[in-house]
Structures are given as structure tokens and as C-alpha cells.
Amino acid sequence: MSAAKESPVSAETELVERARAGDRQAFDRLTEMHLPRVWRVVWGVLRHCEDTEDIVQEVFLTAYRSLPDYRAECSLSTWLHRIAVTRALNHLDLAAEKVRRSSLPIEPSWEDPDPGSSSPEPPRDVRPTPLQALEANDLMRRLSECLGRLPSVWRAVISLRDAEELSYEEIAGALGLNIGTVRSRLARGRLALRDCVEGPRP
């Protein structure tokens, strides 16, 4: 198989090397490749479209400036996830941001938006009955509200595991945690989310 195609990994490695040498087109290509997943990671933490857009831009700007220091000790995807989660959590930690977010209406969608979309919307081809729509909207509202109440560190782990479907090892690498801490935060976060959505038991 002498005519075997270049593997995606080697192609990405070449793009990284070109970008580190100052090739902006190569970095733009890397951005296109990783934008959807970085968007979903940041959205999973922030749950706010405009903030997500701002932080995603910061993530890739930071990555571009830090690329000379990237030593490929982890995959580029893991490196970008780490930057994304750090930036998103820092954003939530700002006192002014906490005050502003407390006055925002809760967005009733659990679905991850398309990076090209201005806001998350349900699929157009789904046509539930009016009763189903009311029940679904109420569940999504409660789920979004409860997710927003979780500590941001729990929300980040839930996002990376349930939305991005990363392995525990990948999450640990992205967040700089050990696997035991990842498992603990995920379990506690899911339990708290379930209890909040279900409400107090009679």
C-alpha cells in the first residue's frame, strides 16, 4: 500500500509545525478542525451564547500566542480543551460576571448549538403534541436551571464527559486533575443535577 493516504494525525502534526513557524493559514485550518469541539466545551460550562463566542475567540487567540510553547506532550485537542475550560471557569469566577448572570433569563435548551448559529434551537422537524411540548419545555427549563446552579468545576466535568464523550483520562488531562477526582466530581455533579431536576421527594 505505497499509495496510502497521510493519516489525520500526521496531517495535523504538519499543520502544527507550520503554524508554529508563523503560517497563519495553517493555524486557521487547525482552528476550523477544532472549533466545533472547543465551542461545545465552552458552551457546556457557560450556557450562554454570546459569552461562549467571546471565550472561544480568546481560546484560539491564546492558543496562537502560546503555540511556540506547545511541546506535544498531550494531543492538540487536549491542550485546547485545557485552555477552553480554564478560560471558561475564569470567566465565571469574575464577580461582575456572577452578578450579571444572576439577572439573566434561563435559556431553555439543553442541546449544544451549532457554532454558526446565534442561539441554540430545537430541530425544526420535531413536531410534538402541545402537551408533549409543554412537558419537554418544562423539563428543559428545569435541567438548564439546575445545571446553572452546579459549581462550575462540576459543570465542566459533566460537559466534557456527557457532551464531548471524553474518556476519564482525557478529562483528567484537560482539567489537570487525577482520574479519581474526575470520577468523584462527575458522580457528585450528576447526583446533584438529578436531585435538582426531580425536586424534593414527598
Image: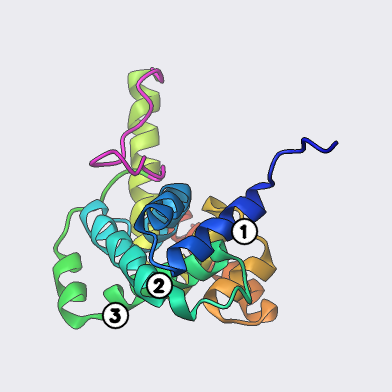
Residue 53 picture location, percent across and down: 26, 55
- Mark 1: amino acid: Leu
Q: 115 and 7: which one is in front?
A: 7
- Mark 2: amino acid: Ser
Q: Secondary structure at mark 2?
A: helix
**Is 104 positioned to the left or the right of 115 in the image?**
left
Q: Is residue 176 above or below residue 2?
A: below
Q: How is the image coloured?
A: rainbow
**Is 4 positioned to the left or the right of 107 in the image?**
right
Magenta segment: 110-127
- Mark 3: amino acid: Asp
Residue at which label 3 appears: 93
Q: Residue at x 26, y 52 (%)?
A: 49
Residue 27 picture quarter? bottom left
Q: 158 and 165: which one is in front?
A: 165
Residue at which label 1 appears: 166
CB under 8 Å between discs 2 and 3: yes
Ranked by sequence position, the earlier of labels 2 and 3 is 3
**Is 140 positioned to the left or the right of 9 in the image?**
left
Main secondary structure type of the part rendered in magenta: loop
Residue at which label 2 appears: 152
